Image (spheres, helix red, strand yellow):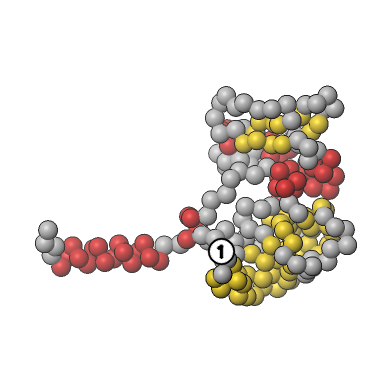
Amino acid sequence: LKMNDNTCAVLATLVMLLAVQEPSEACSCYPLHPQTAYCKSQIVIKGKIVSSRKVMKNDYGFEQEWIEYGVEQIKVLKGNKDSKVQFLLTPPLGGLCGVEVSTDSKLEYVIAGTMENTNTLSASMCDLVKPWNSLTPMQKKGLLETYKQNCNCEVVACVSHPCSINPYECSWTDGQDYWDGWNGNEAQNLICSDSGNGQCNW
């Protein structure tokens, strides 16, 4: 097949567009209820972001540029109460699911993740990292108290009916009914709690 100059130019343009396309579309996280995010995380804190810089991190034998945010810890919501988190380490933004937070001193965040070392917390878009003022009263209560009391219960994302669940599970159906995906009533206002008879219910 012989291509003329115009065809070659169009193909070249398409290749360039694909090459510079934002990688964020490659990042995909499984739906995670705030209760699950809390319970599965090694540490959860409330804090402010005070600085930002790029650092090099050896990841599986490869040197990669990560983002290190300076953290002013306010309160430990889960984990070692003596923890002194000073840094939040996150992958590059976009395809590697890095989180983007603001250094606005007025903003407080809930940050859930894993401790990299004694003063550094690692988190991605697949973890719970949100401004505190964006949370509902029930989510704040959960993070401060009730999620911890019900980590023996499990929230299971139900993509389509019917959903088969075990007695210790709650079926999470927000993704079926709400235009904004999984951030619906069950995520914002409900806790999967132990009823005391071997079953968990909303």
Residue in view at x 60 percent, y 71 percent:
58
Q: Which residue is depicted at the point 75% across and 46% down?
A: 39
Residue 122 can be seen, yes or no:
yes
Q: In this view, does 152 lie to the left or right of 98?
A: right
Q: Which residue lies furthest to the front in this view?
A: 61
Q: In this view, does 175 lie to the left or right of 110?
A: left
Q: In which quarter of the image is the N terminus?
A: bottom left
Query: Where is residue 165 drawn, in percent x and y?
Result: 66, 28
Q: Which of 87 and 115 is in front in this view?
A: 115
In front of the other: 88 or 168: 168
Q: Tell me if residue 151 comes above or below residue 8 in the rendering.
A: above
- Res. 76 image quadrant: bottom right
Drawn side of residue 83 relative to residue 41, left or right: right
Q: Which of 59 and 89 is in front in this view?
A: 59
Q: Using the rendered image of the protein, determine whether residue 49 is visible from the camera's viewpoint.
A: no
Q: Mark 1 points at which residue?
A: 93
Q: Tell me where residue 73 sits by quadrant.
A: bottom right
**Label 1 crowd bin: few (<14), some (14–19), many (20+), radius 10 Å:** some
Residue 155 coordinates in the image, percent (x, y): 69, 36
Residue ID at (69%, 56%): 129
Q: Compared to 43, does 174 lie above or below?
A: above
Taking the spot 58% from the left edge, 45% from the top edge, the residue there is 30
The picture places residue 66, in percent across and down from the top left corner, at 60, 70
Q: Identify the element where label 1 is drawn.
A: loop
Quadrant that contains the C terminus: top right
Indicate the amino acid at tag 1.
Answer: Leu
**How many marks do you count on the picture?**
1
| Rendered location of residue 110, percent (x, y) | 75, 55
